[in-house]
Amino acid sequence: MATISNPSILLFISLIAIALCFADSQSFIGVNYGQVADNLPAPDATANLLKSTSIGKVRLYGADPAIIKSLANSGIGITIGAANGDIPNLASNPNSATQWVNSNVLPYYPASNITLITVGNEVMTSGDNGLISQLFPAIQNVQNALNSVSLSDKIKVSTVHSMAVLTQSDPPSSGSFNPALQSTLKQLLAFQKDNKSPFTINPYPFFAYQSDPRPETLAFCLFQPNSGRVDSGNGKLYTNMFDAQVDAVHSALSGMGFEDIEIVVAETGWPSRGDNNELGPSLENAKAYNGNLITHLRSLVGTPLMPAKSIDTYIFALYDEDLKPGPASERAFGLYKTDLTLTFDVGLSKSTQKSPPTKSTQWCVPKGGVSDVELQQNLDYVCSREGIDCGPIQQGGACYEPDTTLSHATFAMNLYYQKFGRNPWNCDFSQTATLTSQNPSYNACIYPSGST
């Protein structure tokens, strides 16, 4: 059987990434702090919660002064927002933009580490042509207000887009923007290139699954073992929907000549519950998506079109928001409950990360009765991942014999589990794997563990 051995340089990158998992905070992991709720903790309590995690950035949809103050001297990067309703005034009157900056930035910066201002949320796909036409002038005026107080190199200005700005995203290499929006987008993108501000986008594999609710799509969306999808345009293999969506945005930017603009994921997440007729929401799926996303970001593997980096990503959301309208899932994206306890654990606690790795007594192995077809899928998935070295199970390797699908898949599945965090969800493989305390090593074939 064919397995894929990855270059040593990528293994080195992966080892560095594992070391980063024990850093105090990670600037590429952010969270959305929505406030459409009547039961949220006090800002100071939330600030203390955030400081106990490795979350490096927080996105606010407005500019709540109590929250901004509570994050002072924390080092946490803060994105603040001007609402869609603010855009007409900001666009028509430069003094309104100056006043907005004077009220929402200057009293708090630099103690509160404001790094980005988003003007509007998903305006380009709102269908409001008047608002769309005012978006760019509003952004320009906010930028000029920052320029006037010499903060343009410290605080950037952008606007947040939904994936609906793209009319083509599959395969990722064919990603392209809606032609009806391209004139305004070209103005925005030229501005963002000149000012080195990011293109902020809201990719949701959750919604992609709801539009194509097959088991293989769920695995693809949850970063779980799957056969992958080959981009027919460039031959690159995608093993998860997040990378595919982000690369479709990159292709759309490249198609307009703006491939160097940084992409920031302003929102992505998965709900832990929903209405009975909703497909996808569950505690298990939410934990898998968010946990595997964080593991993916920490690996620094990047995407097929943007390798060896992590995309700054704001997970939606910090808390459930009980007053949001719509289906039940809209009120169930929180990583934390409003009593400050975890909805599910995805390894964000600093106390966990500061603890040095202890000697592991667990290995990841297939469950009994799993078919060779399923095992081969797991094997192909693991060995196609950048940063994974399947050399030991290739011919001549210490673990090549016995040359069976079961033996090779067992080695690969455990390698994945040990490499990407040794969390229970790293040993799921679509419910074909289990943890064991019995060391499966044999002869010269040594299975990695937490101490190797």
Image (cartoon, grey):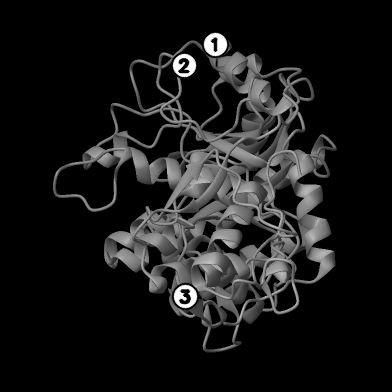
User: Tag 1: Cα neighbours inside 10 Å, few (<14), some, or many (≥20)?
Assistant: some
In the picture, the quarter occupied by the N terminus is: bottom right
Q: Which residue is more in the foreground, 256 or 144?
A: 256
Residue to which mark 3 is pinned: 169
Q: Is residue 256 above or below residue 30?
A: below
Front: mark 3 or 2: 2
Estimate the spatial distance between the alpha carbons at disc 3 and disc 2, rounded to whole Å. Answer: 38 Å
Q: Are marks 2 and 1 in contact (CB under 8 Å)?
A: yes
Q: Which mark is residue 342?
A: none
Q: Which residue is more in the foreground, 118 or 332?
A: 332
Question: Residue 150's quadrant in the figure?
Answer: top right
Query: Which residue in the rendered view is the most extreme toward the left?
Result: 277
Q: Amino acid at mark 1?
A: Ala
**Mark 1 element type:** helix
Residue 227 visible to the viewer:
yes
Query: Which residue in the rendered view is the most extreme toward the front?
Result: 443
Residue at figure coordinates x 65%, y 52% from the top left: 441
Q: Which mark is residue 340?
A: 2
Q: Amino acid at mark 3?
A: Ser
